[in-house]
Amino acid sequence: MQICLSTEQLITEKERQKNLCYFFQVSSDSNRLVFRFSYDPKKLEDEKRSRELIEAGLIKDLSANTYLQALTEWRKFLPLNNLITLSLDHEGTYIGCAHRHNPDQEHVIARDYASPGFIPCQSPGGAWRAVVSIHEVVTPACTFRLEVFEEGA
Amino acid sequence: MEWKAFELHCHTLNSDGQFSVEKLCRAAQSEAYEGLALTDHNTQAGLGELDSFTARYGLTGIHGIELTTFFGYILIIGANRYVDWRFVTPDLIDPLLMEVRQSNGIVGIAHPKIIGNPISTGSHWNFHVTRWNLVSYIEVWSRAFPQRNVQNEAAFQMWTDLLNRGFHIAATSGRDWHAPGKEPANAAATYLGINGKPSHESAVDAIEKGRMFVTTGPRLLLSVLFGDRVACPGEEGPAGRVRIATDVSTDHRRHVYERFHIVPRTVRLVHNGNIVAEKPIESNSIISFDKMLSPGWLRAELYGNIMDNLQLIAFTSPVYFV
């Protein structure tokens, strides 16, 4: 397998609700791509910080009386998690997204097969874009890694 | 026209659901749904196998997607192409909704008042819609046991407020069905008024036109007589004196909900946010009303007992008066 892309990024809450785009080329005789995507940590272990974030979330989205009731049950919202997802485009065509909560993922895009969430790609050669969408960062920092490998005919 | 029970918000392994497409269809059949919409997060990858499995299990399949953005979740039904969700911001939602409409898609707002970040990331509706005419429906009842969820009350009020502002918007339920439950759950069904043969196209037409009612039990039909024309939810007629009929029937899907001891008690008519009539359900399933109604909207609501608690059991989308 030949590597097309390898990146590791440290992110914080500043990157919340942002999309980070990575562009890479795949050779024309390639017929299978493997994407390894992971991030760490997944959970916020700090219970005091969790309570602060939960309280901020509840007060933002609930009315006064339901906010107070929900606050008494704040523990049911534990654990708070980071959520980062991967979506792909090939030559301007959306190939799909793995909107899942598993922080350790491997996806395959091939001519006649694709991992769940993605569609097969008849001719994987050409320009690709991997979009890493930072839905939520609750930990002080989080590192994600993305590697893309191609396999030829 | 026939009324068919649908589940309009479903996920599979293609996003974060635990169902395969086949197992989802089998689960829907076991709960006597007659159709479902596949609405995986940010992917249409499951749609390729949806039609063969819905056919196998005698269901009508609707092709959909849930655009799961940072600022709210958008259910799209029937679009003929993918609309990008990734770069939309709260003030730029109208162009995205326009693009959905241009792709023949129908726009629904998923669970707008659910608690969002950091608990359920992005799921609270934070978009600044100005062109509400681009939105066809709001999912006002989310998840199983919808009456227990205070965020559903807020979503219901949001829908009512939009109707009072003059927008024609329907209301749906959605289980946000990710996995088979361990215990039986009282989940709502959205009944669609299907004209002709049940199909993706006739189901999408019903959603777009607002021919629907939502129930966690009995069927609730609303009819308004305009002259010699009978109108159902989603349709309109001239303001003035009208004869209204509601029909509550308990036979359909009874085996699914009877374990929750649902007993219908009263039918209420709500016009422009005000209760204008309320009658108990007696021996006849049909109740007739004679009302003088000004321009606006009218919906029917069914109240009754669910496990000894008096609750809203069902409601229709509006008939409009112009």
Image (cartoon, coloured by chain):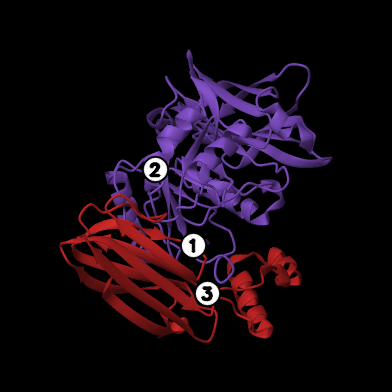
Looking at numbered disc 3 in the image, what kind of residue is underneath it?
Asn
Q: Which chain is purple?
A: B
Of the image marks 1 and 3, the number of the one nearer the N terminus: 3
**Residue B108, label in figure:** none
Compute the Cα span from label 3 to label 2.
Answer: 29 Å
Q: Which residue is mark 2?
A: B47
Q: Is residue A110 above or below residue B117?
A: above
Q: Is residue B270 left or right of residue A8?
A: right
In the image, residue B127 lies at what x, y percent?
Answer: 43, 62
Looking at numbered disc 2 in the image, what kind of residue is underneath it?
Leu
- The chain containing the residue under callout 1 comes to A
At x 33%, y 43%, the residue is: B79
Q: Which residue is mark 1?
A: A100
Dot 2 falls on a residue whose secondary structure is helix
Contact, mark 1 vs mark 3 (Cβ under 8 Å): no
Q: Which residue is mark 3?
A: A82
At x 23%, y 52%, the residue is: A122
Res B316 visible: no
Compute the Cα span from label 1 to label 2.
Answer: 18 Å
In the image, residue A121 lies at what x, y percent?
Answer: 26, 54
Colour given to chain A in the rendered image: red
In the image, residue B205 lies at what x, y percent?
Answer: 40, 31
In the image, residue B49 lies at what x, y percent?
Answer: 40, 40
Q: Quadrant of the N terminus of chain A?
A: bottom left
Dot 1 falls on a residue whose secondary structure is loop
